[in-house]
Image: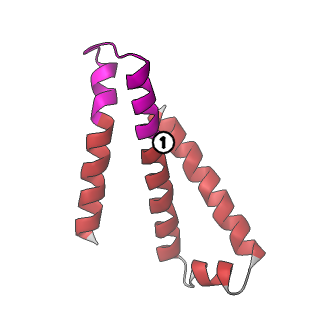
Amino acid sequence: MIKFRLSLLALSAALVAPAQALAQGAQKIGPVGNLVLSVVYGLVGIILLMVGYKIFEWVTPFSVNDALSKDQNRAVGIVVGAIFIGVAIIVAAALG
C-alpha cells in the first residue's frame, strides 16, 4: 500500500511539473501544449477522484461496492455521488 502511495505521489508530481514551469514563466506554450496540459489535469483529477473513492471504501465498515451493486442501496449511491462532487470541487480548486 505504501509503494502504491509513493508511486501515485511520484506520478502526480511528474504530471504537474510542466504546469509549474509554465507558472514560473519558463516559456510560452502553444495550443497543443494547452491541450496536453488540459488532458494531464483531467487525468490527475480522475486519479484523485479514484483515490478519494478508495479512501471512502477503506473508511466505511461495509463494502461500498457490494452495497451499490448487489443491494442496490440508493442512499449509498447518493453519498458516493456527494463524495465525488466534494472531491471534484477540492481538486478543481487545487489545480485551477
Report whether 59 appears left or right of 24: right
Residue occupying image coordinates x 70% and y 70%: 77
Q: Nearer the viewer, residue 50 or 59?
A: 50
Q: Which residue is mark 1?
A: 42
User: Mark 1: which amino acid?
Assistant: Gly
Which quadrant: the N terminus? bottom left
Image-quadrant location for residue 20:
top left
Q: Nearer the viewer, residue 77 or 46?
A: 46
In reply to whether residue 73 is colored magenta, the answer given is no
Q: Local crowd at mark 1 within 10 Å, few (<14), some, or many (≥20)?
A: some
Q: Residue furthest right?
A: 74
Report whether 33 appears left or right of 60: left
**Residue 38 in picture, x, y percent from top left:** 46, 33
Q: Residue furthest front?
A: 32
Residue occupying image coordinates x 39% and y 16%: 30
Q: Main secondary structure of the magenta part?
A: helix
Image-quadrant location for residue 7:
bottom left
Residue 70, placed above or below residue 64? below
**Residue 49 in picture, x, y percent from top left:** 51, 55
Question: Magenta region: which residues?
Answer: 17-41
